[in-house]
């Protein structure tokens, strides 16, 4: 039985949206994961899953708290010695969370999203004493057999989750979880529609914080928060400013620091992005009825977003970026890549080629989650924005 | 009967000829604008492609060749000028430049890819093929071969988890066959597949035997240098009667050497194993860092993963060719991945079996698949085994990140340590 399930980790001060957003900022930036601590103190167990996508519904259905592991701003004192050189930061800081004891897990799952991350489960497994699993999401998304395979893979992962939770998970449990996550994705879509339609009501930083919170809170708690907050945001009395509208691409795995997102927001309206895209991977509600694992597998393959780490012949990344720009009415794109991130760096060539072809202005940049100086970036962005505004 | 003199060195002589013929064949296909298939070493599916007479190109081998011939930097610069970052795989960039040059390569001319077949054993394979898709409109077939999901014993044939994966692989192989029929306009012939599988079986059986033979003292081949030649033939010509014959001959040669106590060209003082990918931009001198001290690489994880797991010696069942192909690919490619991600277990087993004196780790900038976990894997190895290790970083393609003096200093210090250890062990207690 899910005896240890709690649904809330915080009492949110629902009187002042700004106060709530301040608390969001503290939670998202705190590498000691206060929400996880509270969940554990209440007797709950936790499953950490590395970027990009994980069917969190399965963990939720087992009464476990799924936590998105997306690196952190901290020194990788312990983890540094576990890796070689020439690697992105997120791998090291993510492992550091585990080695330093800041993030206590009962199970860790990763997906081989890139050559570096595909090593993570083995490294993690050699350093901790809880189960470390790899979820093999299909890279042959175009095979007629991939849905059946993925359904089997989800069943396998669910068996492991059941062991951690110490209970059986029924189809009804999974359907209940799917409903919670369907609602959550609908709320995140609502949040992104505010970004697109009236970006002056929600700063780039605020939009990011509210999204990122989904990765560290029980999802029903996040739902409750967004259901209260989003209508208030729509009612904000903020004036539209003369800023360019941009799409940020390159945040599918390692995250740019919050200060960088804030810097972008000072010069531009960030109307769409791929930041934490895994939380928004499924584009439509998972239809209810039938076997739930198959429904989730179907949604992953047939009704989903895109990223440089998923291969699908139907979704050439540059075409998808152009559609994102078009859909959001953006004037320009910021094409970012985390330092040493091979998929991101490789995709930059295709993205910029397509943007050149379509005469869409863009700015190319590299970032690191632990970077601390933003002056140069700010200058570049201001120049870029001014060039477009006054061209 | 063939004489000893004729047999010794035959593997190298014939390997060079076969390799040259293969490249000549590719140049001919390029000149005649014939279709070709691009594949990779971890799961090449030549078993299927040869049934359609598609010339196979291994871009990894092409790129390696550029480094060994000391021209890689020219190609890398060209790809970087095109927009590719210095921080991505050098193999990819060298190939991008080959494509931009219309197939011009120091060993001949490489045909344009009509079809690319790749597995998920390395994510760069996937990104690489997307480049051909964009440059040439190449038809890309990505075939998932799920690896092991956790440390510990892998799922075995017959278990539910293995069957789920095997069915998926078989289903995709059938789809690949359909794609090949579509691309070439030829019908699939299962008897032809049986012939190819039989030739592959000879290579697998021989490859396993060759690795076993290096338990001999002295070792009969250097897994770093000789092993790379053997790997070239094993990959490039796999599934042909020429490769089958070559490997039967090679087993004969190495068995003879083992019987007669003939070792490599190095006076064997230390038996080493190699973890990672060799430093091709200075390949000869890199090897000399070790042979100058009497170090011989008697085994390597490279012989495992760069052969796509052929070290297992899996032999296909010709009575049920497609099911068996799926099973063999799953077991072999999965093991190739484990040789990279769980190298501590692989090396741990090798130490006793091959009487290893030291382990050399060589992570490289270009290949995160192989290199990311090596520091931790080494930590785990030395926690369990009392074996000296050397950890040195450079690259397989880019000489800008190869510091020869630093490599030499580290290698020298390692051998001094090995010598001191041997002295200590020889002292009466």
Image (cartoon, rainbow, N blue to C red):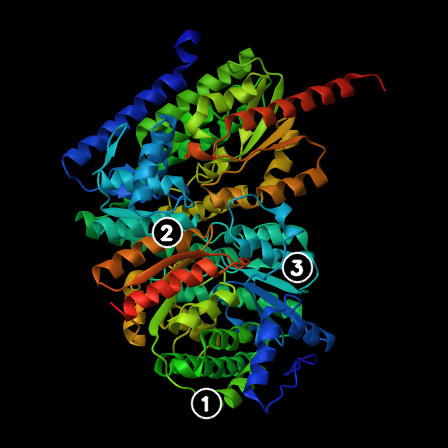
Label 1 Cα neighbours within 10 Å, binned few <14 / some 14-19 / many ≥20: few
| Residue A148 can be seen in this image | yes
Q: Check disc 3 and report its element: helix, strand or loop.
A: helix
Q: In this view, does B328 lie above or below A237?
A: above
Whole-angstrom CA distance, mark 1 to mark 2, is 46 Å
Q: Nearer the viewer, mark 1 or mark 2?
A: 1
Q: Where is residue B79 in the image (x, y as percent from the top left)?
A: 31, 42
Chain ID at mark 3? A
Whole-angstrom CA distance, mark 2 to mark 3, is 30 Å
Of A20 and B13, which appears nearest the observer? A20
- How many labels were placed on the picture? 3
Of B104 and A128, which appears nearest the observer? B104
Chain ID at mark 2? B
Q: Is residue B266 above or below residue B347?
A: above
Q: Check disc 1 and report its element: helix, strand or loop.
A: loop
Q: Quadrant of the N terminus of chain A?
A: bottom right
Q: Name the residue under label 2.
A: B126
In the image, what residue occupies the spot 48% across and 33% down?
B303
Q: Mark 3 points at which residue?
A: A98
Residue B407 position by quadrant: top right
Chain ID at mark 1? A
């Amino acid at each position: 039985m899910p005896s240890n399930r709690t649904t809330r980790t915080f009492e949110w001060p629902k009187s002042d949206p700004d106060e709530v957003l301040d608390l969001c900022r503290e939670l998202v930036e705190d590498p000691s994961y206060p929400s996880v601590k509270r969940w554990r103190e209440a007797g709950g167990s936790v499953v950490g899953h590395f970027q990009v996508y994980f069917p969190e519904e399965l963990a939720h259905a087992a009464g476990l708290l799924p936590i998105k592991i997306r690196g952190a701003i901290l020194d990788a004192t312990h983890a540094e010695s576990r890796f070689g050189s020439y690697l992105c930061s997120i791998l090291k800081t993510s492992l550091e969370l585990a080695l330093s004891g800041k993030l206590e897990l009962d199970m860790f799952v990763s997906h081989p999203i890139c050559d570096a991350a595909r090593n993570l489960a083995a490294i993690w497994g050699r350093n901790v004493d809880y189960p470390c699993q790899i979820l093999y999401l299909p890279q042959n998304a175009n095979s007629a057999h991939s849905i059946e395979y993925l359904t089997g893979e989800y069943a396998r992962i669910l068996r492991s989750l059941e062991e951690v939770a110490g209970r059986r998970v029924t189809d009804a449990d999974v359907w209940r979880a799917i409903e919670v996550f369907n609602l959550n994705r609908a709320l995140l879509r609502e949040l992104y529609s505010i970004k697109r339609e009236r970006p002056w009501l929600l700063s780039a930083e605020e939009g990011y914080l509210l999204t990122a919170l989904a990765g560290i809170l029980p999802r029903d708690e996040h739902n409750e928060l967004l259901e209260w907050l989003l209508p208030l945001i729509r009612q904000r009395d903020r004036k539209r400013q003369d800023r360019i509208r941009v799409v940020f691409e390159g945040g599918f795995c390692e995250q740019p620091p919050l200060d960088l997102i804030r810097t972008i927001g000072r010069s531009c309206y960030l109307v769409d992005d791929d930041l934490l895209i895994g939380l928004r991977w499924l584009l439509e509600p998972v239809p209810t009825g039938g076997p739930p694992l198959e429904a989730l597998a179907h949604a992953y393959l047939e009704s989903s977003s895109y990223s440089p780490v998923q291969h699908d012949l139907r979704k050439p990344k540059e075409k998808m970026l152009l559609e994102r720009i078009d859909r959001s009415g953006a004037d320009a794109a910021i094409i970012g890549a985390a330092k040493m991130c091979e998929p991101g760096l490789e995709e930059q060539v295709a993205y910029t080629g397509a943007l050149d072809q379509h005469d869409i202005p863009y700015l190319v940049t590299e970032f690191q989650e632990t970077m601390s100086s933003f002056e140069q970036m700010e200058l570049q962005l201001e120049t870029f924005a001014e060039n477009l505004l006054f061209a | 009967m063939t004489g000893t003199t004729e047999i010794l060195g035959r593997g190298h002589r014939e390997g060079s000829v076969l390799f040259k013929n293969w490249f000549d064949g590719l140049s001919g296909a390029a000149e005649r604008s014939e279709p070709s298939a691009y594949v990779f070493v971890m799961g090449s599916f030549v078993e299927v492609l040869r049934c359609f007479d598609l010339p196979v190109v291994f871009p990894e081998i092409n790129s390696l060749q550029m480094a060994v011939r000391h021209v890689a930097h020219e190609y890398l610069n060209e790809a970087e000028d095109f927009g590719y970052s210095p921080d991505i795989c050098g193999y990819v960039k060298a190939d991008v430049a080959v494509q931009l040059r219309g197939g011009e390569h120091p060993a001949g001319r490489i045909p344009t890819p009509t079809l690319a077949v790749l597995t998920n054993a390395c994510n760069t394979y996937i990104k690489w093929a997307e480049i051909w898709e964009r440059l040439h409109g190449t038809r890309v077939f990505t075939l998932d071969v799920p690896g092991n999901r956790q440390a510990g014993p892998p799922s075995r044939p017959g278990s539910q988890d293995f069957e789920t994966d095997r069915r998926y692989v078989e289903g995709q192989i059938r789809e690949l066959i359909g794609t090949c029929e579509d691309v070439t306009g030829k019908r699939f012939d299962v008897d032809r597949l049986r012939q190819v599988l039989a030739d592959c079986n000879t290579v697998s059986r021989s490859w396993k035997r060759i690795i076993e033979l290096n338990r001999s003292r002295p070792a009969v081949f250097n897994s770093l240098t000789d092993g790379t030649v053997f790997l070239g033939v094993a990959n490039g010509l796999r599934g042909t009667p020429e490769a089958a014959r070559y490997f039967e001959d090679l087993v004969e040669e190495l068995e003879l050497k083992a019987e007669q106590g003939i070792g490599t060209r190095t006076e064997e003082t230390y038996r080493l194993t190699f973890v990672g990918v060799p430093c091709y931009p200075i390949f000869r001198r890199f090897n000399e860092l070790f042979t100058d001290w009497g170090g011989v690489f008697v085994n390597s994880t490279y012989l495992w993963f760069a052969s796509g797991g052929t070290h297992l010696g899996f032999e296909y069942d010709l009575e049920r060719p497609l099911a068996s192909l799926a099973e063999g690919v799953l077991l072999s490619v999965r093991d190739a991945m484990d040789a990279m991600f769980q190298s501590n277990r692989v090396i741990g087993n090798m130490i006793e079996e091959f009487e290893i004196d030291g382990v050399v780790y060589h992570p490289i900038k270009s290949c995160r698949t192989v290199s990311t976990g090596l520091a931790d894997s080494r930590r785990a190895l030395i926690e369990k085994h009392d074996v000296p290790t050397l950890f040195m970083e450079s690259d397989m393609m880019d000489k800008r990140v190869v510091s020869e003096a630093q490599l030499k200093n580290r290698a020298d210090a390692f051998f001094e340590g090995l010598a001191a250890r041997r002295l200590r062990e020889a002292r009466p207690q």
